[in-house]
């Protein structure tokens, strides 16, 4: 009986272990302004897979991820939405320059730190914010996976692995079995 209970528990927890450490929870809600002071509310994107990049315009790895996300947006069209979130010291000038130099067509949103902190689960015991960080949110508003930049996540940030993550998030979940 104990072995059976342990096996069931392992099967239940396995998907969470495969996902990033900040995954498996409802995506925090927000409404943030873009360069033109138009507000973007994540609740309006329900029904689509949302890719959120927490970034800085001075980060070289962010530039790579931004290009990858732009390609994904072109490939998947309206099935996905891409949002880039910046925090100070980025400002309207740095964002406008970044968007022009990198051909960014997805919204770049201004945060004062609260949205990044809620997504990154920043606390006094865990005070760091590292960029870039990518969150994959499913059509129901749950964080399916998250990725910080590292050698292990290089395929996500440079493209080949991102398509697989998007495809998984777009795949319909099997219907729950009736008891």
Image: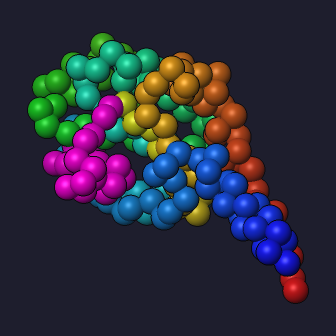
Against 57, is 21 above or below? below
Q: Quadrant of residue 59?
A: top left
Q: Is residue 146 magenta?
A: no
Against 120, is 67 above or below? above
Q: Is residue 34 left or right of residue 145?
A: left
Residue at point 22%, 27% (across, down): 95
Residue 155 rendering spot, x and y as whole percentages: 59, 22
- Quarter holding the N terminus is bottom right
Q: Which residues are magenta?
A: 107-131
Q: Is residue 98 left or right of residue 159?
A: left
Residue 33 in view: no
Residue at point 59%, 47% (across, down): 19
Please name whichever residue, 117 or 49, is drawn nearer the observer in this view of the structure. 117
Please name whichever residue, 102 or 113, is drawn nearer the observer in this view of the structure. 113
Residue 38 rendering spot, x and y as whole percentages: 26, 49
Residue at point 27%, 40% (across, down): 129
Q: Quadrant of residue 41?
A: bottom left
Q: Quadrant of residue 162?
A: top right
Q: Is residue 12 left or right of residue 174?
A: left
Residue 163 in view: yes
Residue at point 51%, 24% (across, down): 157
Q: Please tell me whether the stretch drawn in magenta is mainly helix, strand or loop.
A: loop
- Quarter holding the C terminus is bottom right
The colour mode here is: rainbow
Q: Is residue 118 magenta?
A: yes
Going by the picture, which residue comes out furthest to the front? 2
Residue 80 rendering spot, x and y as whole percentages: 57, 43
Against 28, is 21 above or below? above
Residue 87 rendering spot, x and y as whole percentages: 20, 39
């Amino acid at each position: 009986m104990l072995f059976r209970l342990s096996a069931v528990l392992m099967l239940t927890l396995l998907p969470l272990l495969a996902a990033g450490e900040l995954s498996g929870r409802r995506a925090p809600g927000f409404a943030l302004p873009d360069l033109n002071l138009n507000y973007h509310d994540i609740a309006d994107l329900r029904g689509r897979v949302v890719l959120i990049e927490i970034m800085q315009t001075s980060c070289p790895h962010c530039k790579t991820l931004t290009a990858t996300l732009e390609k994904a947006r072109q490939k998947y069209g309206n099935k996905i939405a891409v949002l880039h979130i910046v925090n100070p010291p980025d400002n309207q000038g740095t964002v406008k320059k970044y968007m022009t130099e990198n051909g960014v067509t997805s919204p770049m949103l201004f945060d004062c730190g609260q949205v990044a902190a809620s997504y990154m689960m920043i606390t006094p015991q865990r005070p760091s914010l590292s960029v870039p960080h990518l969150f994959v949110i499913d059509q129901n508003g749950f964080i399916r996976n998250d990725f910080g930049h590292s050698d292990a996540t290089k395929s996500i940030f440079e493209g080949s692995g991102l398509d697989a993550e998007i495809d998984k998030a777009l795949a319909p979940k099997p219907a729950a079995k009736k008891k």
